[in-house]
Amino acid sequence: MNRQGSLRWKTNDHFVMAGRCIRHLTRNLDNLLIVIVLPIMMMLLFSSVFGGAIQIGGDENYVNYIVPGILLICIGYSASTTAVSINMDMSQGIIDRFRSMPIAKSAFITGHVIASVFRNIVSTTVSVLAALVLGFSPKASFVEWLIIILILLLYALAMTYLSTIFGLLAKTPEGAGAFGFVMLFLPYVSSAFVPLETLPKALRLFAEHQPITILIEALRSLFASTSSPFIFEAIIWCSGILIVSAFIAGQIFKRKTV
Amino acid sequence: MQVENNVIQIRGLKKSYKRMEVLKGVDLNIKKGSIFCLLGSNGAGKTTMVKILATLLKADSGEVILSGCDVKKSPEQVRSVISLTGQYAAVDGLLTARENLRMVGRLNHINDVKAKTDHLLRQFNLEYVANRPVSTFSGGMRRRLDIAMSLIGNPEIIFLDEPTTGLDPQSRIEMWKIIREMAAAGVTVFLTTQYIEEAEQLANHIAVLHEGIIITQGSAQELKSKLAGGAVLLGFGDLSSYITAQETLNGYSCKIDDDTLTIEVATDGSVKQMANLLSILNGTNIAFLEQKQASLEDVFLTLVAN
């Protein structure tokens, strides 16, 4: 009778929900564009169009300089689409069907999160490949690559849960979509594309202390195989945002659906 | 009373949104395997009631027992015996019909998802569109899929919230057939509607929800007899008879029509009253007499007006 409580069925529910969201990715042309075209466009834009004009000092390769920033922009934007899909699900009849079924409560959100991570893995892989073609030359060791993957994964999860909150709170899918713009522009006010010294004072103060700069510096030193205090800080920042936003998202979902 | 026979038992159900009292104490017993119809105008509280019964909303007070399980105390158990088809087709537009069914089947933890999916696609005449995305479906097809998805978990009770609203006449008749077949298979059907005809066509048991309370309930026949015999329509051959009759019938509740020279007299349907009516009109030139039975619509409108 009480077979829905077992771990096996709970796992099953999460997989089914994730499968649903991943299927959506392949059915939705917009999603596909974000996943594959955005990273390539960004890489091309920054390396070819802006690359000649922006001086970063020294004889550093500008492609190497911008890769961390572009990775974060693509991950942030891709994660932000979760807000729209969650909002659409919540405003349509399907959520009522799920809620009236004997399934694990958390499976609905987890399904979206797993799909987002999946989407990010594809998108990040495309970004790195495009960067390599354009002259990106990372010197990271195997262990450093693992740390890079860990940081990017934590960042993707943190941003996905953060956008889940937006998706649950927004009144319309359009409103939920606005979160994407935040994720698209926040990295510009950091050391992602220009050295911080070139920014006006007020912006510099913000840029120096926002977590994106810390993540960029951490990734940059990992790719260059140099040590940096930012690596540890970056992991702490991502984990912190992840834990807090996952908790808040869970609470809001509970309140909205009990 | 035969409590075990009542698969749905509702006692003193109340629900308010902020200061709006939506349900003001609803009591209902619904028999296993029957088609129950909750009839009411827009805003009567039908959807609120379905949402409480389907565990989506908590009642302020009262008790709801579905198939022996208390909705408040053990919602998980309730969810394993019910199925909900809401007002808006709860299908996933990006997935195909087959994928929708398989998803819900797997979430219902049934063993033979593939076989059941194939069976339902055939039963609901969706085989030919099984691999098309649902976003390309017509309203009727979506509804059929929606109901098929509700059936895949073998529910004991199925809630249908206005299942035919927005459907064309052909799809509506098709939906009625599906609902009858479900009940014949032993599923208890709880449906809401604002269409009186639908209630009359389908339901074994009708309850009228108005301003948060059940104002009457019973079979369609019982409800009609509650409003007694309805009326007698008297047609007169000439103007003077028509006028005389009007004077004679002073004191009766009448509806007169000068154009057709007819008078509609409300009666309680008894033979005695009918005989009495004819005896006092003896001598007037009555051209025709027609007994009008109360329609369910009359019952509904009379009750709601009071």
Image: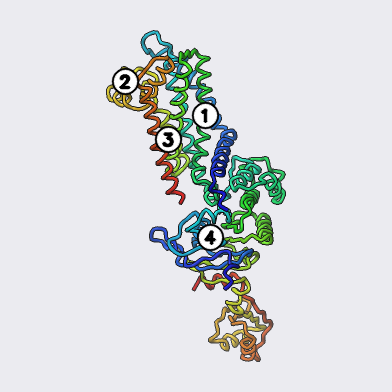
Quadrant in the picture for residue B133: top right
Name the residue that disc number 1 marks: A34
Q: CA distance from mark 2 to mark 1?
A: 29 Å
Residue A12 locus on image (x, y percent) = 57, 41
Q: What residue type is disc 4 on?
A: Cys
Q: Earlier in the sequence, mark 3 or mark 2?
A: 3
Q: Residue at x 57, y 69 (%)?
A: B3
On screen, residue B10 above or below A155: below
Residue B31 locus on image (x, y percent) = 60, 67
| Between marks 4 and 2 in the image, the one whose residue lies nearer the viewer | 4
Q: CA distance from mark 1 to mark 4?
A: 47 Å
Chain for mark 4?
B
In the rendered structure, find residue A179 and report the number of the disc placed on it.
3
Q: Residue furthest left?
A: A201
Q: Are marks 3 and 1 on the same chain?
A: yes
**For mark 1, does the 10 Å Cα neighbourhood hold few (<14), some (14 to 19), or many (20 or more) residues?**
some
Q: What residue type is disc 1 on?
A: Ile
Name the residue that disc number 4 marks: B69
- Secondary element type, mark 3: helix
The colour style of the image is rainbow
State whether residue A88 appears in this view: no
Name the residue that disc number 2 marks: A199
Q: Are marks 3 and 2 on the same chain?
A: yes
Q: Residue furthest top?
A: A59
Q: CA distance from mark 4 to mark 2?
A: 65 Å
**For mark 3, does the 10 Å Cα neighbourhood hold few (<14), some (14 to 19), or many (20 or more) residues?**
many
- Secondary element type, mark 1: helix
